[in-house]
């Protein structure tokens, strides 16, 4: 199986685990390092999702979701992150174009750490204006984990998220 096909299957699994109803939609499309999809909810609202894998671990993904005019950023693991007693984690975000940013993330499920919508809205330029993003976190035992995400190009993958969740901010 080719690396591209493995990434497509992994991205479909991540996208489906982030939003189970997306599993019924067509296979995610690709834009550079991003896999992305869109679906229409029962109430006719649209939901966009884009995901890009970590360079160090193809089981870890940066996932952006736009639903009902709210955008959230999450780190998703294909199985689960190392066990943690804390439901709240601190993530440190680094890119070449911006100062270091520290944000809180909540453990939603064993495989998902999410940044709230308001914070995601404020840090979105880290994603849209950087070539790469390094996300670091410590587990309860003090071990550090860092993940590097390639972000460019993203014009097609993030267009729906920008249009439906961020247009008034940009």
Image (cartoon, rainbow, N blue to C red):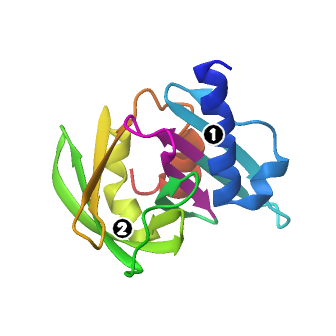
Residue farthest to the left, as pictured: 99
* Along the viewing direction, whichever of 137 and 67 lies nearer the viewer: 137
Closest to the camera, between mark 2 and mark 1, is: 1
In the image, is residue 3 above or below residue 62? Answer: above
Q: Reading the chain from its start, which is encountered first: label 2 or label 1?
A: 1
As helix, strand or loop, the secondary structure at mark 1 comes to helix
Q: Main secondary structure of the magenta part?
A: strand
Q: Is residue 52 visible?
A: yes
Dot 1 crowding, Cα within 10 Å, few <14, some 14–19, many 20+: some
Q: Residue drawn 38% across and 41% down?
A: 128
Distance from label 2 to label 1 (Cα)?
A: 27 Å
Residue 135: numbered disc: none
Q: Is residue 29 visible?
A: no
Dot 2 crowding, Cα within 10 Å, few <14, some 14–19, many 20+: some
In the image, is residue 48 above or below residue 35? Answer: below
The residue identified by callout 1 is 10
* Quarter of the rendering containing residue 90: bottom left
Residue farthest to the front, as pictured: 141
Q: Is residue 142 magenta?
A: no
The residue identified by callout 2 is 119
* Quarter of the rendering containing residue 42: bottom right
* Along the viewing direction, whichever of 136 and 116 lies nearer the viewer: 136
Q: Residue drawn 60% across and 36% down?
A: 35
Residue 25, given in percent of the width and then of the height, sits at 82, 45
């Amino acid at each position: 199986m080719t690396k591209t096909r493995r990434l497509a299957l992994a991205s479909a699994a991540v996208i489906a685990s982030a939003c189970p109803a997306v599993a019924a939609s067509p296979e995610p499309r690709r834009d550079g390092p991003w896999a992305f999809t869109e679906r229409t909810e029962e109430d006719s609202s649209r939901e966009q999702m884009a995901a890009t894998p970590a360079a160090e671990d193809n089981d870890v993904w940066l996932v952006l979701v736009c639903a009902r005019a709210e955008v959230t950023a999450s780190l998703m693991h294909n199985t689960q992150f190392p066990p943690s007693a804390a439901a709240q984690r601190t993530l440190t975000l680094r890119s070449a174009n911006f100062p270091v940013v520290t944000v809180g993330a909540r453990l939603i499920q064993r495989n998902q750490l999410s940044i709230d919508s308001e914070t995601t809205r404020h840090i979105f330029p880290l994603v849209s204006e950087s070539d790469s993003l390094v996300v670091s976190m410590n587990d309860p035992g003090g071990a550090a984990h860092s993940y590097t995400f390639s972000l460019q190009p993203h014009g097609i993958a993030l267009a729906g998220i920008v249009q439906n969740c961020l247009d008034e901010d940009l």
